[in-house]
Image (spheres, helix red, strand yellow):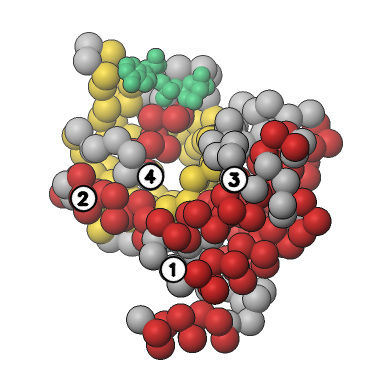
Amino acid sequence: MAGRAVALLEEPPTAPTVAGAEVEIAGLHHAYGATTVLTGIDLRIPGGAHVAVMGRSGAGKSTLLSLLGGLEPVQTGSVRVDGEPLERMGRRQLAEYRRRTIGFVFQHFGLLDSLSALENVELAMAVAGRPRAEQRRRGLELLDQMGLADRRGNLPGALSGGERQRVAIARALANQPRLLLADEPTGNLDDDTAAQVLEALDRARAAAGCTLVVVTHEHEVAARADRRIILTRGRAEQTP
Ligand SMILES: Nc1ncnc2c1ncn2[C@@H]1O[C@H](COP(=O)(O)OP(=O)(O)OP(=O)(O)O)[C@@H](O)[C@H]1O
Ligand SMILES: [Mg+2]
């Protein structure tokens, strides 16, 4: 454990530290009670890809993201992340999978209001059992990468929407996720701020080498991705 902490401290700050997770989805169905949302999704997302998921409201985009992130158990079909089948995991294994593999960025930030920007980022690492010194070092480094070094002491209430979202991205990256999932990360931001947040996500992906799946309604957001997935009537269509 101590050896690992030392190794992490010695990593150069900008070197890619993770390889992006590869995702393979086959025959995925999902229903909430009598409402069937996904009716047979087959997809392959290569490691390190940047994918946009689009589709009308209610098409199942957030559902697909929750399944990928292990927030919802797989009902029917298969979701393999780096070959690991999520459908075979119990609650505890899914929690471990989320902690080890996933970073989430939600539309509504999900920051704790009583903690500063830095403390919000550190908390994610505390939960994962990272040493205190590493939490501080990496927290500061991530906020700096997001252009927020001088905002580190601010509570979320004293940050702009774009700044909060960049704190949320820093937090999602804290534990070096191999799969970064973002659900409409610019949904309630103005165009300029949205562009900054997207730039931050893009840079984060490039620096960390992680796979990025972004749910969006916006064509400018989708245009940044290497591939687009459109959900229609429970099925997925991939466009180059
Ligand atoms: N926990 C739940 N219980 C019951 N139905 C749900 C639940 N979550 C989602 N649904 C339903 O499943 C469908 C897909 O929801 P989902 O949130 O995945 O859509 P979405 O594509 O993300 O939509 P939006 O663009 O509005 O966010 C919707 O009809 C929704 O009402
Ligand atoms: Mg949604």
Q: Assign a secondary structure to mark 2.
A: helix
Residue 214, compared with residue 56, is above or below; it is: below
The answer to whether the beta carbon of the residue marked 2 is less than 8 Å from any atom of ligand 1 is no
Of badges 4 and 3, the one in the foreground is 3
Label 2 or label 3, whichever comes before in sequence order: 2
The numbered dot on residue 69 is 4
Circle 3 residue: 115
Q: Which residue is outermost to the top?
A: 34
The residue that appears at 58% across and 73% down in the rendered structure is: 16
Q: Assign a secondary structure to mark 3.
A: loop
The residue that appears at 36% across and 23% down in the rendered structure is: 234
Residues at marks 1 and 2, CA–CA distance in whole angstroms: 19 Å
Amino acid on which the number 3 mark rests in the picture: Leu
The numbered dot on residue 102 is none
Camera-nearest residue between 1 and 219: 1
Q: Assign a secondary structure to mark 4.
A: loop
